[in-house]
Image: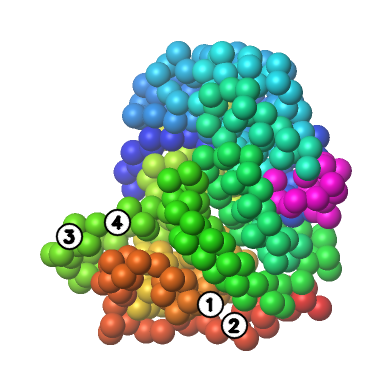
Amino acid sequence: MKRDYTSIRLEITSACNLKCEYCHNAQHSNQRDDLTTDELIMLVKNLKAHYNIKKVLLTGGEPLTKVDICTIISAITRMGIKVDMVTNGTLITEEKLKAMEAAGLKRIRISVDEVDSKTDVRGNSNPNELWEKARMVVEKTKIELCVHTVCSPYNVRKLFDVYKKVLEVGAARWRVFDLGFQGNIVDKKQNFNFESYYDDLIQSTTEILRDYLENGRKDVLEMEINNIFRTAFLDMKEEAYAEFDLAKALETRLDLSPCDYIASHQLSIRSNGKATLCQYFHNSIFDYKEAGFDVAKALENRKPFDEDEITMRDLYYCRECKYCMVCNSGCRSRALFLTGDIRDADPGACYLHQLVHKRIMSMLPKYVQSIYEGFINPKGLNPKYSTEDLKTMLKEKGYNA
């Protein structure tokens, strides 16, 4: 498939100073084959010459363990590329923030899951200290602050408290992620009970949305919750969909990757120079270091793994589902984990999207509901998996035991 990447998710180091219980990347942490700073900069420069790269997200590991982080930010900024960074926040200081701002950093994403003085799952970090560092970003710099929250059985019922803290510190964006069933969580599965998790997630979302909508928070906080709600829904214009042709749109969608934005626009590169579809898949599609950082040569040696090759048409049930256009088949990694088949439906998405339709959309303005209904195929199948199917699969994998 032709790819037209516009952004790079770049792991600049595998080193990390925490050991989070749910870390999906645990098996790739603290390795000895990381690219050097010069190699990282060369790679981005060569990719920029080959693709229309507009943004680079620096991640890890923990990017702030990289002593020459400002050199990397500055070099990429001089290429005319926006630099963004995600961090666990523990190593942030005012001095470091000012230096990164001067180097060109435009946005920083701090990962905070709880409102407390201690955390059950994120290493030995102190959430309250992280909130103060988040506040420092807003008060001491012009770097845009985004808060990342990984939702798990530990904090799902306390998401509203996290949301209120996000508003309090003045973050511009808040993104809530579902955790992946891989990495450290495989060895810690006895600590994670998903029995009521997805119901709790919907309940917390409704509580958050009620406050968000009733108090007009849209103008102060851009929000995205685990493919359940995003602020962009409220910006849709009904007149733009007046002549929307569902059958035609569906036919076009079937020829695209289920993970279309990631597959076509966001290139994920590990700290050793190997590119994967995303952080949840570990197959090396491109190996830039092996290719001598020659992008054309890496393309010639591309490995055709399923996650990067399949289209929505290959998903034998999802393509026929009534929610195909709004669900986009959920997460292929989760489908593979739970069903053993990357082409099968994602049981988590099957369950969630029925609740989104019934409980979340009814809270949104009528014009949003109308547009949403226009994307649902009335002749389509109902989602394949039920909540009981999902719970059974999780138990079979060792969770909820």
Identify residue type, mark 2: Thr
Q: Which residue is at 40% across, 49% downward?
A: 261
258 relative to 29 in the view: left or right = left
Of badges 1 and 4, the one in the foreground is 4
Read off the residue under disc 4. Answer: 236
Label 2 with label 1: CB-CB less than 8 Å: yes
Quarter-wise, where is residue 324 in the image?
bottom left
The percent coordinates of residue 188 (x first, y second) are 82, 61
Q: Which mark is residue 387?
A: 2
Read off the residue under disc 3. Answer: 239
Label 3 with label 4: CB-CB less than 8 Å: no
Along the line of sight, the residue nearer the viewer: 114 or 181: 114
Q: Main secondary structure of the magenta part?
A: loop
Give the Cα separation between the discs numbered 3 and 4. 9 Å
328 relative to 196 in the view: left or right = left
159 relative to 351 in the view: left or right = right
Give the Cα separation between the discs numbered 2 and 3. 36 Å
Q: Earlier in the sequence, mark 2 or mark 4?
A: 4
Identify residue type, mark 1: Tyr
Label 3 with label 1: CB-CB less than 8 Å: no
